[in-house]
Image: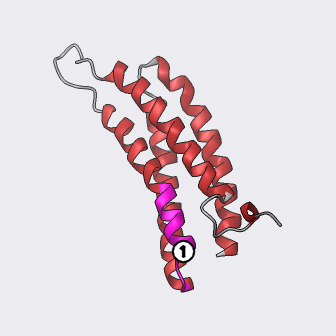
Amino acid sequence: MSPQSYGNTPHSAIYKKALEIFSLARNISSYLSQDLSQLQRNGTEDPNIYFTGDIVQQSISLAPQILKAENQSFSEEKYKYAATVMRLSNLLYKNCERLENVHSNGKDFLPLLRKELKKFRKLQHNWRLTL
């Protein structure tokens, strides 16, 4: 068997998918934040701009939490970090849904991120069973 087939290597499928999601979220965020950074007609900022930062923060936290879960000796600790990964992926998905309602051309890329998150959730389910 190749080393990539084991769940406890830094090159596991879920870890790679987390890195892909981070890269995609970062690019979408920078595209959206350019459109949302302009002041509205009443002089206020668009409150949705904060969700662009949230998707980056949540996506950047996925990979380290996966590694922490995989490197723990005790199953209780593994499941604690796995629960954090689940919570982060759920928040990330909800923030994508919120950003799909903004007035920006960048929102067209959000369904792609949500599709990748659905793939991540399937990997996550199998990953949790192997912890």
Q: Is residue 71 magenta?
A: yes
Residue at position x 54%, y 84% from top?
73
The quarter holding residue 40 reads top left
Residue 62: x and y in percent read 49, 56
Residue at position x 65%, y 40% from top?
115
Q: Main secondary structure of the magenta part?
A: helix
Residue at position x 59%, y 40% from top?
114
- Quarter of the image with the N terminus in it: bottom right
Q: On the picture, is 104 further left or further right than 119?
A: left
Q: Is residue 32 magenta?
A: no
Q: Identify the coloring.
A: secondary structure
Q: Is residue 74 above or below residue 131?
A: below
- Quarter of the image with the C terminus in it: bottom right
Binning the other alpha carbons within 10 Å of mark 1 as few (below 14), some (14 to 19) or many (20 upward) gives some
Hey, which residue is sitting farthest top in the picture? 41
Q: On the picture, is 58 further left or further right than 7?
A: left
Hey, which residue is sitting farthest right in the picture? 1
Q: Is residue 17 above or below residue 98?
A: below
Residue tagged 1: 71
For mark 1, give the secondary structure: helix
Q: How many marks?
A: 1
Residue 82: x and y in percent read 54, 69
Q: On the picture, is 130 further left or further right than 33?
A: right
Residue at position x 22%, y 18% from top?
39
Hey, which residue is sitting farthest front in the picture? 2
Residue 72: x and y in percent read 52, 79
Of 49 and 12, the residue lying toward us:
12
Q: Which residues are magenta?
A: 62-74
Q: Amino acid at mark 1?
A: Asn
